[in-house]
Image (cartoon, rainbow, N blue to C red):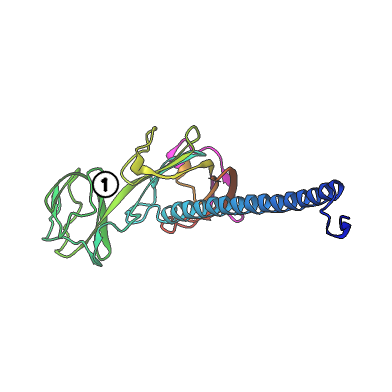
Amino acid sequence: MEDRREAGFSLAELVVVVAILGFVMAAIVGIYLVTQRSTLVAGAAEDAQVLARAVLDQVASDLRLINSSRSTATGAITAATATSITFLGDIDSSTIIGGNEATLAATAGQGDTSVGVTSSAGFSVGDQLFVEDGPVYENQPIIGIAGNTLTLGGGLNTWYARGSIVRSVKTVTFTWDAATGTLCRNANGPCLAPFAPNLVIASGVMNFQLTYWSGASPPSQILALTTQATRDTVRQIRAQITTQSRVGDQTVRRAMAIAAKPRNLPSS
């Protein structure tokens, strides 16, 4: 006779076991998918936040230097909209090479339209030359560069001794292109769409908004910026950005904002 104690599982028992295993595997797969999705979301969120912070740090750093190395308090912001700004300033200390600041290589006389400098690195045609000898300083447009000689668009107003400090004042533009989600920064002129690749400082920018405020207490927002006189009243600029990042099949957006007060504009 057959020993029933050594018989295999019945069909009903196998069905129950398979069903239990199916529930367990479904739970494991579900937990894995949730964990994977959470990881992708966290990665995308971190990338978007890092991008937003890096862009705002760059924007704020440059905005704080509006009007630096200029001899006048007016005309620093030459254009301003909700998505773009153009201004003048020595924003990157480009004339300081290896810790050594560029200076006049020889005395420059009143009315001179060309000056020799110890190094022309950091100067570009279209910049403004800032020259300073103690309490005396001025700006002149640079229209030509040959070696270490700068040709100016106007004669110097006074004479400057050899060793006088010289700097380059750049025309800086930030512009956001909503169609491509790119933000342009150009330290030598305008940003013309489509932006040159070397001028794009960020992609995946879903929104970029600038607002302009007076120096009143409390500050009041300046809405009409079509005239130079109105732009000259700006004392604070607030920038808000929304960035987007995709990791795997997960897309996340992050929004950040920052306020910058140009240090080289007079207090109101």
Q: Is residue 253 left or right of residue 95?
A: right
Q: Relative to residue 43, is residue 205 depicted above or below?
A: above
Q: Which sits in the foreground, 198 or 208?
A: 198
Q: Which residue is mark 1?
A: 127
Disc 1 on helix, strand or loop? loop
Give the x, y percent position of residue 18.
Answer: 78, 49
Magenta: predominant secondary structure element?
loop
**Kind of residue at disc 1:** Asp
Give the x, y percent position of residue 66.
Answer: 40, 52
Q: Which sits in the foreground, 79 or 231?
A: 79
Give the x, y percent position of residue 188.
Answer: 30, 44
Magenta stretch in the rendered image: 210-229
Q: Is residue 242 left or right of residue 98?
A: right
Can you name the residue that lies furthest to the front here? 1
Q: Residue at x 58, y 42 (%)?
A: 249
Inspect the magenta stretch and tell me whether residue 228 lies in it.
Answer: yes
Q: Relative to residue 190, is residue 160 depicted above or below?
A: below
Number of labelled discs?
Answer: 1
Q: Residue at x 64, y 53 (%)?
A: 38
Q: Residue at x 18, y 55 (%)?
A: 158
